[in-house]
Image: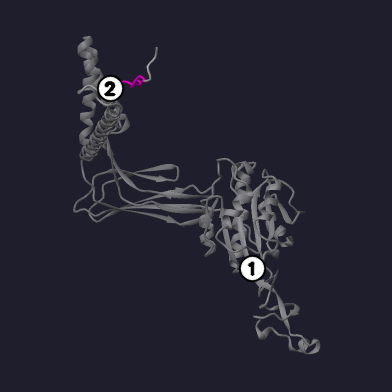
Amino acid sequence: MTTGIDAPASTPPEPAAPAPNAPSRAARAAAPSQSRIALRSAGRSLAASARSLADGLRRAGRAVGAIAAPVTGVISPVGWLVLAASLVALALAWPLGWIELAFVGATLLAALLVAVPFVFGRMAYRVEIELQPRRVVAGERALGRLVVHNVGDGASVPSQLELPVGNGLAEFVIPTIPAGGEHEELFAVPTQRRAVIVAGPAASVRGDQLGLLRREVRWTDPVELFVHPVTARLKPSAAGLVRDLEGEITKTITDNDISFHALRAYEPGDALRNVHWRTSARTGQLMVRQYEETRRSRLLLVQPTSAEHYASEEEFELAVSVLASLGVQVIRDATRLAVATDRLRLGTATPTALLDDTCRIAPLEDAAVPVRDVVREAGRRIPAPSVLIVVGGSRAPLAEFRAAETVFGSDTQVIVFRTEVGAASRITRVGESTIVTVGSLDELSRLVRRVRP
């Protein structure tokens, strides 16, 4: 039999208290993180120390190299090879027991020691390089003059002077020169090709006959000889490139110019000086004049130089000659001109400045750059030209030349000169562009006279 008193409900057991020395869960999770942080800090410290050590070693190496440069600088590549061979031979002679290797090593080392006296000695020279003339046309003759002055107190000893000329090297034996005297040497400069030929620096050379040691002393700065491209003589105001004296009319309508276009109704803000009073009185409404905008001619001359656009090196040189011929005549006509290639922006202040810069034009051997991109880059920092002339090779697609029409507005006339050695010279019209095929430079003057933009 049950009683009316309820039994007390059972209570859940209390969690066991953690051991006094047991770490908490957060502490256990933080411990690995702190270890990783410590390892990273140590790694960074070691890396910084290694960098500092490497920097210190590099500075020490440079300091040692600077101190040893007067000695190591006179050892030629052949001398370093002989020195290395002698050390290897001597190092192998003892463990292998070969007396022959010891003899070879000692002989090579002795050769270096015997060569040492040949690099000693001082010369008091003043050297001059003269090129006459400084500018020639490809194929013309150019001569150089090397003058050596002895500015020392006594007679000089015989020496050898080397003078780089373009890709070649001229060597001169300078005899004994009395104090205050001079010695002269003449040399010819090869000018068969358009180029900038650098003569110098002239350097005196002392060393042994075997070429183990070589000491050079430079006496001059380099001197440049400009070999200009062959150009054709064009007549003034060459055939349609520039025909206006006051400016050429464009399709842009403006409120203030000299070429009358039409009348329109007056609008607030119009200048009263443009009001046409006679028409206004007749119509009972104010009418103002409109004009066609005129501007002075500006010519942009561009040559894409990608080697893929030219069938041969001769064709590329013909294109440079066409570019130079057109540019020189436009400068003489006092027309504003900009000339550019893929990599160069040529000077146009004088014909000589332009011809000097054409000597530096070289084929671009990288991937072909589209003609449109070359034209866009050339015209990036100048106003839109009235005439755009593109000079290119026979392998450039006509579509690329036509794409150049889209770079500027419809007011810009586009003329393309395509060089094709030996081809029949002709003028054709493709789209809005005039295409002039140039087979030889002799035909350029006749073709330019027939061009009608």
Residue 409, picture quadrant: bottom right
User: In terms of sequence position, does the residue under pointer 2 or pointer 1 come before the other?
Assistant: 2
Compare residues 266 and 95 and report the one nearer the observer. 266
Residue at the spot of label 2: 85
Horizontal and vertical percent for residue 211?
30, 32
**Helix, strand or loop for disc 2:** helix
Q: Are marks 2 and 1 in contact (CB under 8 Å)?
A: no
The quarter in which the C terminus is drawn is: bottom right
Residue at the spot of label 1: 297
For label 1, count other residues whose C-alpha is less than 10 Å away and answer few (under 14), some (14-19) or many (20+): many
Mark 1: which amino acid?
Answer: Ser
**Range covered by the magenta-colored residues:** 5-15
In the depicted structure, whether residue 246 falls above or below residue 148:
below
Q: Residue at x 26, y 33 (%)?
A: 41
Residue 234 highlighted magenta (yes or no): no
Horizontal and vertical percent for residue 188?
45, 48
**Helix, strand or loop for disc 1:** loop
Q: Residue at x 67, y 72 (%)?
A: 294
For label 2, count other residues whose C-alpha is less than 10 Å away and answer few (under 14), some (14-19) or many (20+): some
In the depicted structure, whether residue 40 falls above or below residue 266:
above
Q: Residue at x 66, y 86 (%)?
A: 273
Q: Give the color scheme: rainbow, by chain, secondary structure or one colour.
A: one colour
Mark 2: which amino acid?
Answer: Ala
Residue 125 as seen in the image, left or right of residue 399:
left
Horizontal and vertical percent for residue 75?
27, 34
